[in-house]
Image (cartoon, rainbow, N blue to C red):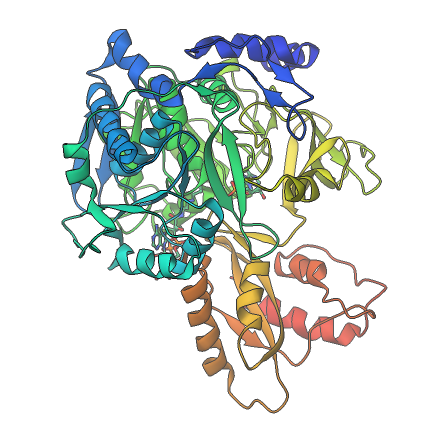
Amino acid sequence: MTRYDETHSRWRRDPEAYWAAAAKAIDWDVPPARVFDPALGVYGRWFPGARLNTCHNAVDRHVAAGRGEQAAIIWDSPMTGRVETITYAALQQRVAKVAGALAARGVGRGDRVIVYMPMVPEAAIAMLACARLGAVHSVVFGGFAAAELAARIADAKPKAIVSASCGLEPGRVVKYKPLIDAAIALSPHKPGAVLVLQRPEHPCELTPGRDEDLLAAEAAAAPHACVSVEATDPLYILYTSGTTGAPKGILRDNGGHAVALANSMSLVYGVGAGDVFWAASDVGWVVGHSYIVYAPLLAGCTTVLFEGKPVGTPDAGTFWRVCADHGVKVLFTAPTAIRAIKKEDPAGAFLARHDLSKLEALYLAGERCDPDTVTWSERLLAKPVVDHWWQTETGWTITGNFRGLGLFPTKPGSGGKPAPGYDVVVLDEANQEVPRGQIGSLAVRLPLPPSCLPTLFNADERFRDAYLAAHPGFYSTADAGMIDADGYVWVMSRTDDIINVAGHRLSTGAMEEVLASHPDVAECAVVGVRDTLKGQVPLGLVVLKHGVTKDEATIGGELVAMVRERIGPVAAFKDARIVARLPKTRSGKILRATLRKIADGDEYVVPPTIDDPVILEEVGEVLKGAMR
Ligand code: COA
Ligand code: AMP
């Protein structure tokens, strides 16, 4: 038996004992008397009755333990040319004062705060300050448009927003202030206070009576102590794409999150206090929440917060330079980032210029990883490369490979084996487990482990409908795939309308809503077309209303501008094609699943219910022509 098999079996035999042991790594105000109560919440709650503060666990306790002078955050920003180190002691002071500033503006336990920030240390500080107060942050990714920000403000009803004057994209300054103003104007809920980090690259004018300078507010504030909260109290809401335009508010609790994330640092990544960990992602995504901010700090590591891109800032050697400069032990990024580097530097000339002796492993997640990317990076780095599968909903890995247990051999293209805590199964439509090697819906037997969402924010029914209804007794991941004879899990595709563009999770349904609102569009479909760099890119197929004579370039340009305006540049919607008709069933439903398969380059069968196979052929040709 390998250590992985032994640990997974130990968890299976007695899950409560497994998580009770993991909970010992956390400082509790009231230690858990009960590990799990199946009678609470929608499917049960972890550590009910226990009390803690997540910020204390991520910051203060390390200072108390004598690690105050260790670097907590290294901010490396090729976008500005600056590198700054914040020690745990300095982080504690800054977080306590920002918490004081928020408290002075009426933010307390349970209140929501929207954080809309670029990759600057103040983003992590704002998140931790909320955690310190027992307030609930909701970070919104900077690449979303004002309307998306407005939808989140309307749903979360924040008391305050913490933001910055600008974000920096290559060749472009993203001015946040007009986006915040437009979002607040659009939202029926108006936050009382907006604290703005004035960045020297583009300071903005503050709206009197509402906006204040974040750094001035921090300087004037009294430091605030950590507020003890229930383990089951919410720590944050992170909105993610659902199957409709309305984003789903994924809820994360304090106790289960702290336990699972602290545990994951040693179990999954094999790092501990004092090690340097770098998740090259964005605080707006779950990877950023879990592995730029919370998990490395809970474990007493140094975390790297990087403001830049894998290529072009200034070159394809940036990732390796950051690893070498800061002594990164484990790097975590999306396969897209590695594909971008590989495209520009296939032979690894940039890599050869840096001393990567401290780097021990590369972890990849966020999208399906093609075997080429794994083998190329493994060969070049001569270090283990681990593909691991997870979702915003879970907050940490569902399947992977576990440095803390000694790595088992990888199979490129597979997401590894289930983490202790997850009983992963493949189900058919009748809710029966399918034989090994057969494709079906990937599901997790309830209860989900700590850190996974207990429900959606203010939406228990939607949670049940979206995740629990399809397979009673299981959480549906909305991914299809299989488990092979050796127990490796292979994640193949989504079963819903979510596409994954450069590691960013997007809803084609939301894009279709935008296209359908164009006055000349009769009907439309958006599909994710295979792309060698970004994995998938959205393609709009539109049927025009009778009598419209505009050409494809004109309509396409208008639709591209509309999606950018309403969803944001991150949607990467750049291509819309006019088609005469869309393939449908005889009952009039657009054959989206079949279109998705063609666009992904997968095998497909023409559904027997099809109305006119010729239309499918016509549209199929358009899709194949759009693949890159
Ligand atoms: N704020 C504002 N705009 C943003 C943004 C942000 N935080 N992040 C991205 N955008 C914009 C980009 O500027 C770009 O706009 P453009 O259409 O004007 O060029 C658009 O959104 C698409 O961005 P992106 O998907 O990043 O594509 P790209 O072509 O600029 O870069 C890669 C390609 C591969 C370098 C980039 O996608 C990448 O680094 N991917 C890794 C993704 C990742 O880390 N995901 C996290 C999950 S683990
Ligand atoms: P997100 O919630 O943005 O993290 O996106 C989650 C989705 O990304 C999953 O449901 C999968 O479809 C996909 N995904 C993430 N990691 C992997 C992986 N390692 N392999 C395959 N798909 C992945």
Task: Pinpoint residue 350: horizontal percent, then vertical percent.
Answer: 28, 41
Q: Is residue 407 above or below residue 64?
A: below
Q: Quadrant of the N terminus?
A: top right
Q: Quadrant of residue 417?
A: top right
Residue drawn at point x = 42 percent, y = 26 percent: 383
Left or right of 120 in this view: 146 = right
Task: Pinpoint residue 411: horizontal percent, then vertical percent.
Answer: 59, 31
Residue in front for this viewpoint, 124 or 583: 124
Residue drawn at point x = 36 percent, y = 46 percent: 341
Q: Quadrant of residue 128?
A: top left
Residue drawn at point x = 47 percent, y = 54 percent: 151
Res 387 visible? no
Residue in front for this viewpoint, 612 or 430: 430
Task: Pinpoint residue 325: horizontal percent, then vertical percent.
Answer: 22, 30
Q: Is residue 534 above or below residue 39?
A: below
Residue in front for this viewpoint, 87 or 162: 162
Counting the numbered discs, the total is 0
Task: Pinpoint residue 7: horizontal percent, then vertical percent.
Answer: 60, 12
Q: Quadrant of residue 582?
A: bottom right
Res 286 visible? yes
Left or right of 357 in this view: 221 = left
Left or right of 114 in this view: 506 = right
Q: Is residue 449 above or below residue 107?
A: above
